[in-house]
Image (cartoon, helix red, strand yellow):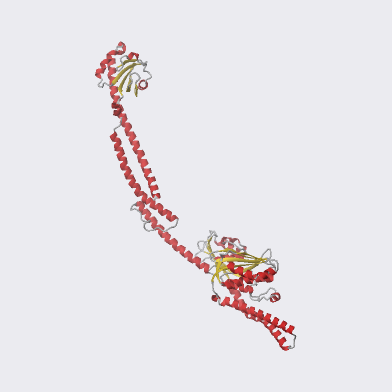
Amino acid sequence: MPIQQTFRRKIFYYFIAVFLSFTVAILLFQLQREKNYKTSQLENTLRNVTEVAHNYIEHYNLMKTQNFSSADTLKVLIPQDNIRLTIIDKRGIVLYDSFVYEYKKMENHFERPEVQKALFGGEGANIRHSATTGTDFYYYARNYDDYFVRAAMVYDVNVENFLKAERLFIFFIIAIFLIIWLVINELTKRLSISITKLKDFAIKAGKNEPINEEEGRFPDNELGEIGSQIVKIYNNLHEANNSIALEKDRLANHMNILNEGIGFFTPQKEKMLVNSNFIQFVSIISDTLTISAENFFTIPEFEKINKFLEKNLHKDTVFQSNELPQIEFTIHKDDSYFKLMCIVFADKSFEILITDITRPEKRRLLKQQLTSNIAHELKTPLASIKGYIETLMSNPDIDKAKQQYFIERASRQAERLNLLLNDISLLNNIEDAGELFEIKPVHIKGIVSDVVENLESRMAAKNIKCKLDIDKDVVVNGNDSLLSSVFQNLLENSINYAGEDIKIEIRNYLEDTNFHYFSYSDTGVGIPEEHLNRIFERFYRIDSGRTRELGGTGLGLSIVRNAIQLHKGNISARNKPDGGVEFLFSLAKQ
């Protein structure tokens, strides 16, 4: 694999570079040492020659007699034929040369390198070409008091080879280097296996991937033992994390099916886990369409919780796990009631629980009022029908036009009574037999489009425009008939009571894992604030006379609320700052 080869090459080249540097240093040192030794031998031979020549000159006092031609006798004393002897005075004039017959005509030798070295160092050597003889020499010169004696050996192949280092040593060094090469190759191979497996493990661990049995098997060495222990620790942590994640998923799923809004936060007030109801309830309480969990602490309605947290999240505050601080209070918002509870845990993390207590409270009141409301609402159309019939029965001679008028009025009241009974029946079915409604995936845009199309003529008569901002892929799990009733009742409310020349907007403004959130708004006259928190009550009318005149039963918005609640959602209403009313509601995806 490429990673293993790259690492192995790097570490191999590193070791080889170090050893190669060491080997080259040893080789160069040894070669230079051997060369110096052989050069020293050669110069020692030439030194002996110069010493013999010096003794001869001193013995025969040649510097005084100037009879240097007698120095030819020295040729007999010099063992090698290829050694050249030269005598030079202090001015560089050649006094004698064994290789040149007319040595007196030779040029001045004072500037010769070996002579210069001897002048300042007592002796000197140099390898160069002789312009006089046309031959290469190895020169050696010595400085005596009144003259220089130079001995030179012809620098031929024999001398050159003599000065060269022995090749056997070079071959020996190369052989040792190749053996070390193979050893380092094997060592780096074993080392790279362990380190590369550790690297592969680290990459997988960084991606939080499981380690299989083969990947967790390391070579049998110290590094391998370390790797095996690390893998074992990682697998234990991975299993623990998986278990924690599973428990967290269970908790999240459990939270999402709760009717309460619940949120868990860090000591720094950062969100750890919240469910959709928490966001929905906070949005209702704060009158904000979109809000994040962290914004909870900036909302004025929750100032009491902020003060409670400031007191108990202080770093100096200490409490026992069996005496956890908590606070509980109720918030009344419009037509809704919410109970809030906050509890701080021993590690200073905390939980906030929001419970909608509107429904049970209102259900109790509804049960009390239901009987009287139904009796009151049924009494009016029944009394009208009875009055018309009694009029017809007691006046058999009434003209045909009057008879037709009374019959039509009685029929209209009978129809109203029928609508009222149907709405009451629908409400009861939603509350008491909701499981009987067929639930299936429903495309909201299609439902709303059909309702708008059915009411198009009524809207056109009042110059009402309707804008839909719902994606065609928005699907909820619900009953298409009930969902049609929701949007039809909302639209009929706007048509009947909002006024003319208004605009209606229906949009899907938010979604999360479990819910779609919708807004229905119009630009009409709105709803007086004193009535806003009661419009979802049964039989509640803002203007009872006008409602009856327009054929309303007073149950439309109550049906809307109960149908939405059957779909696991909630609804609230508010007046818009620029006029009109807005309904905010949610529908469950599943």
Residue 118 appears left or right of 549 = left
x, y (%) of residue 338? Answer: 59, 69
x, y (%) of residue 340? Answer: 57, 67
* Residue 177 in which image quadrant: top left
Q: Is residue 238 visible?
A: yes
**Residue placed most toward the observer, 270 or 506:** 506
Reply above or below: 172 against 210.
above
x, y (%) of residue 426? Answer: 60, 77
* Residue 467 in which image quadrant: bottom right
**Residue placed most toward the observer, 458 or 50:** 458
**Residue placed most toward the observer, 546 or 61:** 546
Reply above or below: 126 against 300.
above
Residue shown at the point (74%, 83%) measured from the top left: 401
Q: Is residue 331 visible?
A: no
Reply above or below: 349 against 556.
above
Number of numbered discs overlaid on the protein picture:
0
Reply above or below: 516 against 392.
above
The extreme front residue here reads 400
**Residue placed most toward the observer, 134 or 396:** 396
x, y (%) of residue 512? Answer: 55, 64
Residue shown at the point (57%, 60%) measured from the top left: 294
Residue 273 appears left or right of 163 = right
* Residue 571 in which image quadrant: bottom right
Residue 550 appears left or right of 187 = right
